[in-house]
Image (cartoon, coloured by chain):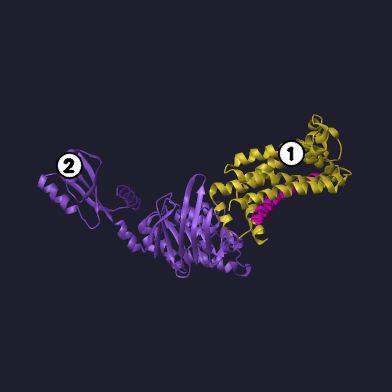
Chain colours: A purple, B yellow
Amino acid sequence: MIEAEHVTKCYGEMVAVDDLSFRVEKGEILGLLGPNGAGKTTTMRILTGYLAADGGTITVAGWRHPDQSLEIRRHIGYLPENNPLYPDMCVMEYLSFVAAMRRVPKAIRKNRIDLVVAMTGLEKMAYKNIGELSKGYCQRVGLAQAIVHDPEILILDEPTVGLDPNQIVEIRSLIQRFGKEKTIILSSHILPEVAATCRRVIILNRGKLAGSGTPEEMSARARGGNAVTFVLKVPAAEVMSKFRAIPEVKEIELKGEEGAGQMKYRIITDDAIDMRETIFRMAVDNQWVLTELYRESLSLEEVFQHLTITEAAS
Amino acid sequence: MTGALALCRKEFNAYFDSPVAYVFIVSFLVVTYWFFFRGFFLNNQIQMRDYFFFLPWVFLVFIPAVTMRLWAEEKKMGTVEILLTMPVREYELVLGKFMAGFLFVFVSVFFSFSLPLTLSFFGELDWGPVIGGYLGTCFLGGAYLSFGLFLSNFTKNQIVAFILTILLSFTLFILGEDIILANLPDFWVPLFSFVGLGKHFISIQRGMIDSRDIIYYLSVTGFFLFLNILYVARRR
């Protein structure tokens, strides 16, 4: 459905997308994952025809950018980053504007808009000004706008950013529903976000392809590092030296003082090693007062940091 | 053309969705009426020369206010990204926005038509110059609109678009003035007097509709619209 080969895009000196190649099959939900500034938005802008690539070839549904950009744009629904909308327009007015612009035939326009409004649960907001809607509803308007012409391909740039957990769940389930019949590319910088909706993930880093695979493979890789945070009521120097002596500990850092002599530490270990028990035993053996202890998965940025740091070291 | 019409409708409604339209129309009428009535009772003549004399200067400030938002606002809000990824050709986008601006100015000017109607009750009004004046107003307005629309592309800031448009319109308007022509080498005089917007307006408002003036306005407007289309297409 979508084929990108050796796509490159520079902004002046800065290379935003660097020799990127990937394919998306029909009916697939692909996640574009990467830290901010990795080139996700630029890639999507090139796919949608908003920007022209400096090099490489892109084929969408059999048409090629940039010569057949108009045909391509017909088949794409796009939710840009930050979901731009016209605050002074009411929802219905906006959707019928978009439907007309996207060449929805006049005869079915009304039905199509009603259907989309029902699908996105906007019935009660249909005649409100977009500027008065909450962020969650705005996001639904953004999605409704992207599907109003029933495109085969949906490109969604960070569709859930800035929403509260309930809204995230709602938007995700909407996307999954669309995914039953459409090809979707969505971007995020949060791994669980992508894992929840996508069947395949591409990781971008500094405009380059840093890896691809199923979400399970990606989370396994992300779990490549475990972090444990704990708070002890002990002078820092003693703790730091004792932990550095343990071979499993890759890194220990002092996160700051919590007050009343309590110090917060964070250690990073390899995958499949749970340090919580060790820390507890050390605290008991040394008679340290342990007030807090918890484990967390590393965020994508940290995995990236980790990957780049270890790559540089080896 | 579906795209151009849909966009035109959206842009035209946008003026009325916010207070912009009402503030604009009221102040436009107040200012132009004031210029007209200032001399009307002194001259004691049934004619609208004064009205059309001041109109280009009023337009100089009012038209940029209409065009400044057309692209700059889309850029600022980011909606330009949605607009440019719609399956619509660049010329349709430019034309749609231009038509909306033109229609809006037309509506504002239309309200001033109460003036010649009132005058015709007082006595014999020579309709020739009045029709000519209104026609010239449309052409001149169209030209200013095309400058403003084009310049609105270059900034996210509406104020900057506003002032740049005043600057360009002003420069092109005064090019044909005698004081400028008098200071030019002879070789440049015909060119400058042809390019100057003002010269062509004067002959139209006298009631003489010369095809050269109309062609002039159409080509200036067309040229800037064309530049605008090129600019929009360039970013892809």
Do marks 2 and 1 share a subunit? no
Amino acid type, mark 2: Ser
| Nearer-the-camera pick, B179 or B32 | B179
- Could you tell me residue B87's position as x and y percent? 60, 61
Amino acid type, mark 1: Leu
Q: Magenta segment: does it hold B93?
A: yes
Considering the whole magenta stretch, tell me its main secondary structure. helix
Residue plotted at (76% across, 48% down): B219
Task: Tell me: A131 left or right of A205.
Answer: right
Q: CA distance from mark 2 to mark 1?
A: 77 Å
Residue plotted at (71% across, 51% down): B103
The residue labelled by disc 2 is: A241
Badge 2: residue crowd in 10 Å (few <14, some 14–19, many ≥20): few
Proximity of marks 2 and 1: CB atoms separated by less than 8 Å:
no
| Nearer-the-camera pick, A259 or A284 | A284
Q: Is residue A134 visible?
A: no
Nearest-to-viewer mark from 2 and 1: 2
Q: Which residues are magenta?
A: B90-115
The residue labelled by disc 1 is: B172
